[in-house]
Amino acid sequence: MTVRQDQLANGFRIVSEHMPGLQSAAIGIWVTAGGRHERIEQNGIAHFLEHMAFKGTKTRSALQIAEAIEDVGGYINAYTSREVTAYYARVLESDVALALDVIGDIVLNPVFDPAEIEIERGVILQEIGQAHDTPDDVIFDWLQEESYRNQPLGRTILGPTERVKAFSRADLAGFVAEHYGPGQMILSAAGAVDHDMLVKMAEQMFGHLEAKPAHVVEPAVFTGGETRHEKALEQAHFALALEGPGYRDDAIYTAQIYASALGGGMSSRLFQEVREVRGLCYTIFAQTGAYADTGMTTIYAGTSAGQIGELAEITVDEMKRAADDMSPEEVARARAQMKAGMLMGLESPSNRAERLARLVQIWDEVPPLEDTVARIDAVTTGDVREFAGQMAHQARAALALYGPVKGAPSLTQMQERRAA
């Protein structure tokens, strides 16, 4: 498999990887314009714009966009994160050019029909309502807000209801004009793709765009804090976050291995102690997420009202214990899980195209996969124990609680237990 990269004169980047033996391909455009690029009065507009992309262009109606891809058996979708918005499709090899034409059309030529804006506004308000009705979704928005208070990175991607109700056609067009420049776009493809054809099409479709200044995001500051929302639910939901490394920090590999060993699978410490030994919950896990300049190690669990206090205490105790006795066997298992998960995932052209785009966004190049594997293999038990100690005694933390949580300890109490 060969990764190839090119860049147009205006800064538009193309990256692809041909995967022999495949008859299909994944292709998309990743735009460095996500939630953290919004001003406070724009909160939610990147996501709104993603929805509107499929609602019609200068040459295609919303139905024609869907039919163009589905008539050839393909699939088209999009997502918004805090740092990117992506528009992508999965098609057969013979339809790659069609897919790029459709994706380019929805990115470059949205019409923002007023009637469609109102229809999609209602859809997004329903999506916000659904998220609020899903405890293990909304609690992570609250946790993010407490982790990065009063900052773009702490705001919800969907945006608050009052903002979504007020967005106008001019607001949408203004965000595109501000952020959808060629230097903010990456065309990424993997599978049965011809790189030279992609570059030629990209030049035809995007080569005329004028470069825009790069948007400088507000540096993230992990503030920490606590939020609790009492509600008569069946379960008490618990989410704890600590600051971790950003994705440009070599320590990200240690953080990921630590999270996996602590709560990444059925053999992990939290799963074994909290669920298997004590039976305090059905779901508990730890995970690590990363951004350009910061990251988060997060622990989540759902339990009963009467057991949330015990669950919180055990969680803190297991974090502290990991700093002292994390074993080489646990680290080796977590390392193997991390490598296997990554390599198995990359058998999918969709995952591979996303990885290519992400790496170009981060590094402006695609480091060899062997280098990534070597960095994972280089993490030692001592590295993980040292990182565990930093997590166990970190001065700031964020805590979000939802449901029947009167019996849950406060963040101050948990911090005192961590320091003891």
Image: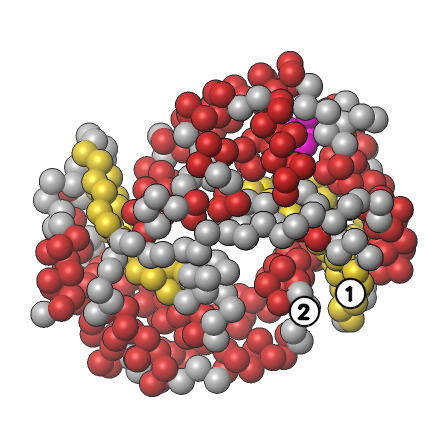
Residue 339 place in picture, x, y as percent: 53, 72
Q: Which amino acid type is marked by label 2?
A: Val
**Which residue: 38% across, 59% down?**
296
**Which residue: 67% across, 43% down?**
180
Label pair 1/2, CB-CB below 8 angstroms: yes
Name the image quarter holding residue 49.
top right
Query: Which residues fall within the magenta stretch?
Result: 51-55
Q: Quadrant of the N terminus?
A: bottom right
Magenta highlight on residue 320: no
The image's colour scheme reads secondary structure
Q: Earlier in the sequence, mark 1 or mark 2?
A: 1
Q: Is residue 14 above or below residue 388?
A: above
Which of the numbered marks, if any, corresponds to residue 5? 1
Q: Quadrant of the C terminus?
A: bottom left
Element assignment for label 1: strand
Instruction: Estimate how packed mark 2 is, as few (under 14), some (14 to 19) or many (20 or more) residues with alpha carbons within 10 Å.
Output: some
**Which residue: 40% across, 70% down?**
255
Left or right: 302, with 54 as reference point: left
Which residue was labeled with disc 2?
366
Name the image quarter holding residue 256.
bottom left
**Which residue: 27% across, 63% down?**
270
Residue 286 in sight in this render: no
Q: Nearer the viewer, residue 405 or 176?
A: 176
